[in-house]
Amino acid sequence: MVSVETIAIGIYLAFVNVAAFVMYGADKRRAQRGLRRIPERTLLAIALLGGGLGALLGMLVFHHKTRKLRFRLVVPVALVLSLVVGGGALYFSDYYHADATALEAIASTDDVEVQTLSTGDLAFVPRDATVGLVFYPGAKVQAEAYAPLLMRCAERGVLCVLVRPSLNFALFDISAARDAAEQFPDIEHWVLAGHSLGGVAASEYLAGNPDAADALVLLAAYSASDVSSSDLRVLTITGSADGVLNRAAYEEARGNLPAGSEELAIEGGNHAHFGNYGEQRGDGTATISREEQQGQTADAIVALAGSL
């Protein structure tokens, strides 16, 4: 389903380009009739505000401002900027949203206090925790979609910090683990975890900061960087029905992990059921429930945390 944000951006770009085209045509007619003109700075401004395509078409169709050097320079640049910025905005605005179950999980209970940290990240804080987990969400997935999984872990004594990265893209906030550790100095052991591209982000941070955690958990993910010489405990969890994970890249990246790394293949699990954001394009059909997949995942994470 196309998000509201994507529709809004599309409407804006359509409007501003139509407006730019109309303004260039109107200014040409005014010039021909000797009427008061639209200021050149206004014509250039609307091109730079996303109307580069409409402005360029207006110049070509109406043969207007084509001899003016600054229009010949600025309008094509504005078109490129519109494509880059507009395309980027459309790309990042189309993301998977957390479902109602996920949002309901972001609430304190008798055993777990949910906090919003100064970084904007969410923390699920149990009493007397000694092990903490920092979780990087999958690309273009609203971070809150992983709240049910992390609440399961927190209810069993693991402090969990859910990273809420810029534009729902974990690679933009790789150092979030450092900020989380600074917020909870009493935690003795840290585990970094991530789903899909979030797992790549977690491993990338550890490649440059090998002492930042004791363990790494990869959910339908692999390490693109070599951490094989580290002392990390690594657990990889996949679903047998995952249709999104690049299996060839996954197999090739095995050598990037330390010897003795563990793997858990959840029979009947798929890619999207690690979180609560609906079904994912290209994914396989799960034969177990989302709750069952997350339950098995939480069991494995808590077991790893308890062994540190």
Image (tube, grey):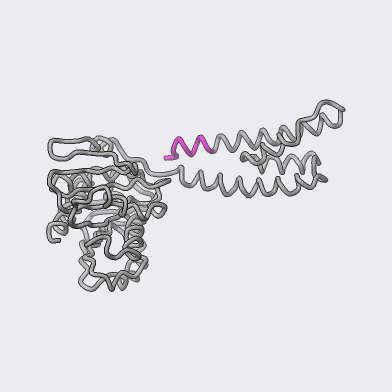
Question: Quadrant of residue 40 in the image?
Answer: top right
Q: Determine if the magenta segment contains residue 6.
A: yes
The answer to whether residue 162 is magenta is: no
The stretch in magenta equals 1-9
Please provide percent x and percent y for residue 301: 18, 55
Q: Residue at x 79, y 47 (%)?
A: 69
Question: Residue 210: image x %, image y %?
Answer: 29, 65
From the viewer's perspective, tell me whether residue 7 is left or right of residue 47: left
Q: Return the x and y of residue 250 as percentages of the image width and height.
A: 33, 66
Above or below, comparing residue 238 to residue 228 in the picture: above
> In percent of the image, x 30 and y 38: which residue is there?
99
Query: On the rendered structure, is 97 left or right of 73?
Result: left
Horizontal and vertical percent position of residue 274: 26, 50
| Quadrant of the snapshot with the C terminus | bottom left
Front-lying residue, 168 or 122: 122
| Quarter in which the N terminus is drawn | top left
Front residue of this view, candidates 225 and 285: 225
- Prevalent SS, magenta region: helix
Can you tell which quarter of the image residue 263 is in?
Answer: bottom left
Q: Looking at the rendering, which quadrant does residue 264 occupy?
A: bottom left
**In this rendering, is residue 216 above or below 113?**
below
Q: Nearer the viewer, residue 123 or 8?
A: 123
- Examine the rendered structure and indicate whether residue 115 appears above or below residue 240: above
Across the whole image, how many numbered discs are drawn on residues? 0
Given the current orientation, which residue lies at the most extreme top position? 35
